Image (cartoon, grey):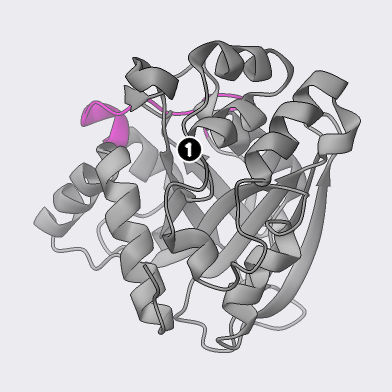
């Protein structure tokens, strides 16, 4: 499948994400029922740092539509690097793409990952990297579990390939909630499970960004040989941004230590 417009890509992303993240459309339906208009703060992706699917390769799908790099982030413990992208139009969502530093893991994991990436056609670029699913053939469940032992991030990526990891509701745009804490309390009442790693709210007004997320749910997923196993899929995130005193405009960046905790929303021992 080939999408030639930015909106076409976003529509594709939401449709694919909604199917494997059942909580996301539920939350949107509940918000719509309150009369809210939902604004997406950012869309996030995971990948490996290997051509042709490294961060810059995936980012080129968005720079072609006017996006530019807005920040670089490093996660030493999880062995990740990430770039964020912003568009001159403030109504368009930020893009956050992280990549696993594959070379910092065991030779076994590296061999498995290179075998997966070798299945991606070298000429695949732009939006086709995202829309030509599946990215690679289903992995054996035992391989998935082996990768998971070294990296929750890599295990998730081996199973799902290159697709949206999460969408993010911009709390600033909501009219019936006065704070992210109030929104989180509402989510709990509605039966959603929050990521409590490092506290339900990551970041502070002083850091100009507060974030929270729900834990990923387990859904049946197909592995090699047609085996079906329940594994954590994607999650939904929520962000409240504050005005940057230097510009008077909403802060457009991210906070690495907060993102580090948000990544744990797909951890297999915490998923619901």
Outermost residue, left side: 33
- Residue 218 in sight: no
Q: Residues within 10 Å of mark 1 (few under 14, many from 20)?
A: many
- Expressed as whole percent of the image width and height from the top left, the position of residue 211 reads 54, 47
Q: Nearer the viewer, residue 144 or 256?
A: 144
Depicted 63 relative to depicted 225: above or below:
below
Depicted 243 relative to depicted 106: above or below:
below
Locate residue 171: give its quadrant: bottom left
Looking at the figure, which quarter contains the N terminus?
bottom left
Count of numbered marks:
1
What residue is shown at x 43% (from left), y 80% (from top)?
A: 6
Q: Main secondary structure of the magenta part?
A: loop
- Expressed as whole percent of the image width and height from the top left, the position of residue 247 reads 72, 83
- Expressed as whole percent of the image width and height from the top left, the position of residue 129 reads 54, 62
- Pointer 1: what residue? 160
Secondary structure of the residue carrying tag 1 is: helix
- Expressed as whole percent of the image width and height from the top left, the position of residue 19 reads 25, 44
**Left or right: where 102 falls relative to 24:** right
Query: What residue span does the magenta drawing correspond to?
Result: 186-200
- Residue 176 in sight: yes
Q: Nearer the viewer, residue 260 or 20?
A: 20
What residue is shown at x 34% (from left), y 34% (from top)?
A: 185
**Left or right: where 241 falls relative to 107:** left
Does the magenta portion include 103?
A: no
């Amino acid at each position: 499948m080939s999408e030639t417009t930015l909106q076409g890509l976003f529509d594709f992303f939401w449709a694919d994400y909604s199917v494997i993240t059942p909580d996301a459309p539920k939350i949107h339906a509940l918000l719509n029922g309150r009369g809210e208009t939902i604004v997406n703060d950012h869309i996030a992706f995971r990948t490996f740092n290997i051509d042709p699917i490294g961060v810059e390769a995936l980012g080129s799908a968005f720079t072609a539509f006017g996006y530019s790099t807005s920040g670089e982030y490093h996660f030493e413990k999880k062995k990740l690097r990430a770039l964020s992208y912003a568009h001159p139009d403030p109504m368009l969502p930020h893009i956050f793409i992280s990549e696993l530093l594959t070379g910092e893991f065991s030779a076994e994991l590296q061999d498995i990952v290179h075998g997966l990436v070798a299945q991606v056609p070298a000429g695949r670029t732009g939006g086709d990297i995202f829309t030509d699913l599946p990215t690679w053939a289903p992995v054996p469940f035992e391989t998935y579990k082996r990768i998971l032992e070294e990296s929750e991030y890599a295990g998730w990526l081996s199973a799902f390939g290159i697709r949206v990891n999460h969408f993010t509701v911009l709390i600033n745009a909501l009219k019936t909630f006065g704070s992210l804490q109030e929104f989180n309390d509402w989510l709990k009442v509605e039966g959603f499970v929050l990521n409590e790693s490092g506290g339900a709210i990551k970041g502070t007004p002083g850091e100009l960004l507060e974030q929270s997320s729900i834990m990923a749910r387990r859904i049946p997923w197909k592995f090699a040989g047609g085996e079906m196993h329940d594994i954590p899929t994607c999650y939904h995130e929520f962000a409240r941004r504050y005005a940057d005193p230097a510009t008077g405009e909403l802060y457009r960046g991210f906070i690495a230590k907060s993102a580090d905790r948000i990544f744990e929303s797909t951890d297999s021992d915490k998923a619901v």
